[in-house]
Amino acid sequence: MKIKTKKSYGAWLGLFLGTIIFGFCIWGVNFALADGDKTLKVMIEVLIYLFLGIFLIIIIGAFNTYYILNDSEIKIKWGFRKTIIPLENIHGIMEVKGKSNYFSIFGVSWPGYIAGLYNIKGLGTAKIYGTDISEGFLYLKTSSGYYGLTPINNNLSQDIATKINQDIEYLDMDELPLEKKGKGLMEDRFYKLMFYMNIFFLLAFALYLAIFFPGSGAPNAVILLLVLAIGLFFFNISNAARLYQFSDTGGFILLVLGVAITGIFIILSLFEITF
């Protein structure tokens, strides 16, 4: 029996944004360094295409995630990868409700999509393959590890429970005490402020160049600053979220550095274009 994941536009959102971001970065490097340092151009392009390859694997996974349950096992299909869990190895089924506080150990997520290894505060680690876990997910405890799934309905958990003759546990994350669940990233006002400041500075930089760069006579290399700012943005927000779980100050510093460096890029561009 094939079970689909919860309905979500996460895969399409990722494809849309990824096409714009990688498309601009590839064009930007070629435009900025067309007559410049060929070695630098090749080095940057190699990095971009490396991340593009990884991104394509992730996107294929986003469009090809589902679960298959039969009498002896459950299969988790993600992209080209298939994880098989014998039902006899499942020793716990839990329906998790509410908003979880989690962070990536080795994974990727954006609104409507999540895949990889995550630490879920108050619950533990889990390999999650699904779409939207903002309102809950299915948590399987197995002999080979813990898994988080987002089936389209509760039938999967009930069917597994029936096949292995176990009761389903229930956990409401919204009722967990703060000591166990911890503070979410966006519940920290300073972190939230710096996160949105990074987005604002990046968008302001892109808008400024879109309006004032054409016809300004500024060197093409100015566009490379925006490419670097985009790379810095994604590096910072992913690592700041992870670092915050161990040191909130460390997470703050990364985000502040992101704002500061993007601000410096804006100032450099301002001098090149205006003066």
Image (cartoon, rainbow, N blue to C red):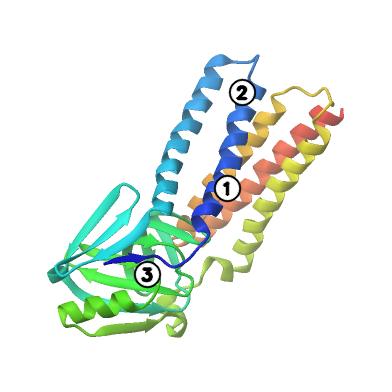
- 84 with respect to 47 (left or right): left
Q: Of circles 2 and 3, which is in front?
A: 3
Q: Residues within 10 Å of mark 2 (few under 14, many from 20)?
A: many
Query: Amino acid type of disc 2?
Result: Asn
- Labels 2 and 1 touching (C-beta < 8 A): no
User: Where is 136 relative to 26, above or below?
Assistant: below
Comparing 221 with 49, the one in front is 49
Q: CA distance from mark 2 to mark 1?
A: 22 Å
Query: What quarter of the picture does the N terminus occupy?
Result: bottom left
Q: Tell how many labels.
A: 3
For the question of whether residue 250 can be seen, the reply is: no
The picture places residue 271, in percent across and down from the top left corner, at 81, 30
Horizontal and vertical percent for residue 39? 52, 16
Say what amino acid the circle numbered 1 marks. Phe
Distance from Cα at disc 3 to Cα at disc 1: 24 Å
Q: Is residue 213 left or right of residue 131?
A: right
CA–CA distance in space, label 2 to label 3: 43 Å
The disc at residue 30 is: 2
Instruction: Judge by depth and name the residue closer to the eye, 163 or 117.
Output: 163
The residue at which mark 3 appears reads as 151
User: Which amino acid type is shown beneath numbered disc 3?
Assistant: Pro
The residue that mark 1 highlights is 16
Q: Secondary structure at mark 2?
A: helix
